[in-house]
Image: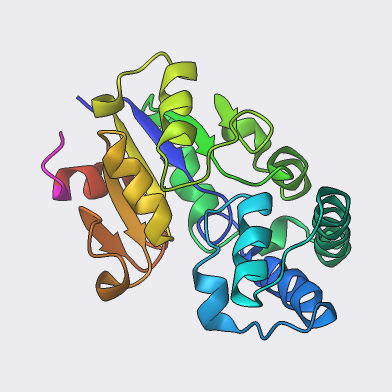
């Protein structure tokens, strides 16, 4: 029986993915490395360090640790500048009512994100109060598709993996959920998330019971 719902943050609850793209693109440009939407897709759900390592590998660059940290800090500074003016209006359509529906039905709600800015972002857009557990880049160091972020989320909710459904928009995130023994609802397009048990375009006009019944989970 499903008792818990685990959500990724960027691109699932709020549209901060565009700000990550701008910050990484700005950093890559400063290093002379081409970076577009194709490259950005490969960073979804990936930690800040691994994202930097991938970008450097694409540019065939190797940097000493102090410079690595400098660029990670600078990228995060740029990202925070971009999201500084976010407000509750930037929550993706249908998210707030879906979370309210889940709470009303007694489901436990957790966040599983590689972001180290998850808590301040949730507070900024007024979603923090919906969550019973938050697992972010400060809690786990393994990047998706490693399942650690979702397994820790289930643990904090005191649930077994098979009692949880994950909501993800990234290939790596869907794989992480499946590797963790959880069902996964993809956010996006079916052809881009073939491992997901079900794919929806967004939360508008969706209900928890409708989605779970569609997965034959109730």
Identify the image quadrant of the C terminus.
Answer: top left
- Residue 165 in the figure: left or right of residue 12: left
Q: Position of residue 143 (x, y in %)?
A: 52, 45
- Which residue: 84% across, 58% down? 80
Q: Nearer the viewer, residue 63 or 213?
A: 63
Q: Is residue 5 on the magenta stretch?
A: no
Classify 103 as above or below 9: above
Q: Main secondary structure of the magenta part?
A: loop
Question: Which residues, given as a range, are shown in magenta?
Answer: 214-218
Q: Position of residue 20 (x, y in %)?
A: 69, 66
Q: Is residue 189 visible?
A: yes
Classify 1 as above or below 182: above
- Which residue: 50% across, 71% down? 41
Q: Is residue 206 visible?
A: no
- Which residue: 65% across, 38% down? 137
- Which residue: 24% across, 27% down? 162
Q: Nearer the viewer, residue 199 or 42?
A: 42
What colour-coding does the image apply? rainbow
Q: Position of residue 61 (x, y in %)?
A: 71, 71
Occupied quadrant, residue 146: top left
């Amino acid at each position: 029986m499903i008792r818990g719902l685990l959500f990724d943050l960027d691109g699932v609850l709020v549209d901060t993915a565009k700000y990550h793209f701008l910050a990484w693109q700005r950093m890559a440009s400063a290093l002379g490395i081409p970076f577009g939407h194709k490259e950005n897709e490969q960073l979804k759900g990936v930690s800040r360090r691994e994202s930097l390592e991938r970008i450097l590998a694409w540019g065939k660059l190797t940097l000493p640790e102090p410079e690595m940290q400098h660029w990670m800090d600078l990228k995060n500074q740029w990202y925070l500048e971009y999201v500084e003016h976010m407000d509750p209006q930037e929550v993706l359509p249908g998210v707030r009512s879906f979370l309210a529906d889940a709470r009303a039905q007694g489901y436990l709600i957790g966040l599983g994100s590689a972001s180290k800015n998850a808590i301040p972002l949730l507070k900024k857009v007024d979603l923090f109060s919906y969550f019973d557990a938050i697992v972010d880049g400060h809690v786990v160091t393994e990047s998706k598709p490693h399942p650690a972020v979702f397994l820790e989320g289930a643990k904090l909710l005191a649930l077994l993996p098979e009692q949880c459904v994950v909501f993800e928009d990234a290939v790596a995130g869907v794989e992480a959920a499946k590797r963790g023994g959880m069902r996964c609802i993809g956010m996006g397009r079916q052809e881009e998330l073939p491992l997901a048990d079900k794919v929806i375009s967004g939360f508008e006009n969706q209900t928890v019971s409708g989605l779970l019944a569609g997965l034959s989970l109730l």
